[in-house]
Image (cartoon, rainbow, N blue to C red):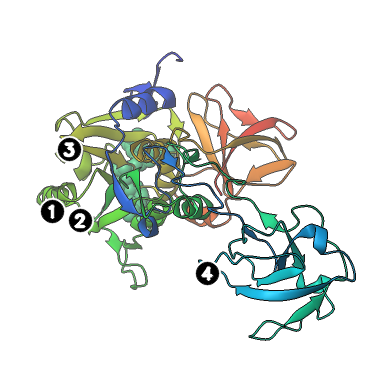
């Protein structure tokens, strides 16, 4: 941990990003596990191992449409009498004598008497196929031993782990679990999160602003970022700078949330309602974090609900979400890996950064180079620069100038 510095504006002591993050993660608990149907489980984290209830594949079956035969009989030029027709899903196990074969479809159970499959293509009739099987076929190419048989258990043994605890469930994992014989999983509950934007200047996006008014964009950003993080967004509201309105919004939000994310009113302004209403409530405390943007931060817990009070500036919200909110929500959801990947790139241009605060700057980058997403510097109001940003450059607090050619750490956002 670095030494504490002092906020130039307020003179209040500043805490580091790591200290604020440690305080948040220290108050964050993994949500309980529950049974969830596979169709609702995308993105959840498995709480228990899922076992294969049976071997996968379940039974020996054909990998090809063709004829199940005795390989020794099925030499090139041999004529085989077709004595049965086995479709996928058929329970039949027809007897197959010498010189005989059964027509068989892909996925159908292998008759016990047969030891190879002659694909349609390796017969005189080729792939021209009727509903009723032919009486006789002529083999044009002898199959290799056990050809085109998918053996029971060749993918996974009965009782083996299909998907392990701690795995995030994507489409591929869910399909493996279904094949393993399960309709549901035991997974950590999806966090439920509410958003409250504060500010008397805010109007609905799309409405025409009067003097002093601006479109409300923070809740738009947060709703989308929360959904992308796999959480349930339970309530989104915008309240004016009014203590009573904020108290009511908090009661409503807490009733349906594991976490509430507020924006605005976190600083030292005359109408900073979030700070004046929430500072000192339960464990909520406001700090100056040595980060630019995103200096004023409030955090605490009211009963079981985490409360994040982010500063109002739009870039501060975006950065604070990535640095503090998203890691906490991923912890709640049961992820072991809570952080975005980081890469190192070369600065294509120089830029200034505030000494004493870690700069977290929206950037564009490619395989080699990185540069600021905005031409206008690193101001926390530069909401338009977010549209181009692909990542966040993390520049240490003791640097006040990035020079062209410097190595820069980039948090990758996609
Ligand atoms: N005297 C001082 N003034 C300020 C300080 C300071 O230390 N001393 N810190 C500055 C910093 S840094 C930040 S960050 C801001 C944070 O202030 P608040 O959290 O109180 O945020 P607001 O004042 O409510 O809003 C800031 C800015 O963002 C716009 N905003 C707010 N909410 C939204 C929204 N939902 N959608 C779009 N834009 C929003 C708001 O209109 C303001 O322009 O304080 C500095 N001041
Ligand atoms: O800390 Mo504020 O978030 O720089 O603009």
Q: Which of 387/129 is in front?
A: 129
Instruction: Pinpoint residue 130: horizontal percent, then vertical percent.
Output: 68, 86
Q: CA distance from mark 3 to mark 1?
A: 13 Å
SS of the residue under disc 2:
loop
What percent of the width, then of the height, locates residue 246?
16, 50
CA separation in Å, label 1 and label 4: 66 Å
Quarter of the picture holding the N terminus? top left
Relative height, residue 269 to residue 116 (above, below): above
Distance of label 3 from label 2 (alpha carbons): 15 Å
The mark that comes first in sequence, 3 or 1, is 1
Which residue does the image show at 28% across and 58% down from the upper left?
A: 201
Circle 2 residue: 240
Q: Residue furthest right?
A: 77
Q: Secondary structure at mark 3?
A: helix
Measured Cα–Cα span from mark 3 to mark 4: 67 Å
94 with respect to 47 (left or right)? right
Q: Position of residue 166 (x, y in %)?
A: 43, 36
Residue in the image at 75% along x and 64% along y: 98
At label 1, counting other C-alpha atoms closer than 10 Å, the crowd grade (few under 14, some 14-19, many 20 or more) is some
Q: Which mark is residue 123?
A: none
State the mark number for residue 278.
3
Please report contact status of discs 1 and 2: CB closer than 8 Å, yes or no: yes
Query: Residue 90: in sight, yes or no?
Result: yes
**Which residue, given by chain and number where applicable, does mark 1 sit on?**
245
Disc 1 on helix, strand or loop?
A: helix
Q: On the image, numbered disc 4 is attached to which residue?
A: 90
Closest to the observer, 13 or 44: 44
């Amino acid at each position: 941990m670095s030494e504490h510095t002092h906020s130039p504006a307020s003179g209040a002591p500043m805490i580091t990003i790591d200290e604020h993050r440690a305080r948040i993660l220290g108050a964050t608990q993994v949500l309980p596990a529950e049974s969830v149907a596979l169709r609702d489980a995308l993105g959840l984290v498995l709480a228990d191992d899922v076992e294969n209830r049976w071997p996968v594949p379940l039974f020996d079956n054909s990998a090809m449409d063709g004829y199940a035969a005795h390989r020794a009989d099925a030499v090139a030029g041999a004529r085989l009498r077709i004595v049965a027709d086995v479709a996928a899903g058929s329970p039949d196990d027809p007897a197959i004598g010498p010189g005989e074969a059964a027509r068989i479809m892909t996925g159908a159970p292998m008759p016990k008497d047969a030891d190879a499959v002659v694909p349609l293509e390796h017969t005189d009739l080729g792939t021209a196929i009727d509903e009723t099987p032919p009486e006789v076929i002529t083999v044009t190419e002898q199959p290799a031993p056990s050809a085109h048989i998918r053996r029971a258990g060749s993918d996974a043994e009965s009782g083996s782990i299909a998907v392990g605890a701690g795995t995030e469930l994507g489409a591929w994992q869910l399909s493996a679990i279904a094949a393993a014989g399960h309709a549901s999983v035991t997974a950590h509950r999806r966090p439920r999160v509410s958003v409250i934007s504060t500010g008397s200047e805010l109007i609905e996006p799309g409405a025409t602003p009067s003097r002093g008014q601006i479109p409300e964009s923070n809740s738009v950003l947060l709703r989308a970022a929360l959904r992308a993080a796999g959480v349930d967004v339970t309530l989104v509201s915008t309240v004016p700078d009014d203590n009573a309105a904020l108290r009511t919004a908090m009661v409503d939000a807490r009733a349906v949330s594991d976490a509430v994310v507020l924006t605005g009113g976190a600083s030292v302004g005359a109408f900073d309602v979030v700070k004046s209403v929430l500072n000192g409530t339960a464990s909520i405390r406001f700090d100056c974090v040595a980060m630019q943007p995103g200096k004023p931060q409030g955090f605490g817990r009211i009963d079981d609900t985490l409360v994040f009070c982010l500063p109002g500036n739009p870039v501060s919200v975006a950065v604070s979400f990535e640095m503090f909110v998203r890691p906490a929500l991923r912890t709640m959801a049961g992820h072991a890996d809570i952080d975005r990947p980081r890469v190192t790139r070369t600065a294509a241009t120089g830029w200034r950064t505030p000494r004493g605060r870690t700069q977290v700057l929206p950037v564009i980058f490619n395989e080699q180079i990185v540069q600021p997403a905005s031409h206008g510097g690193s101001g926390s109001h530069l909401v338009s620069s977010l549209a181009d940003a692909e990542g966040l450059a993390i520049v240490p607090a003791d640097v006040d100038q990035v020079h062209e050619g410097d190595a820069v750490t980039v948090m990758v956002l996609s």
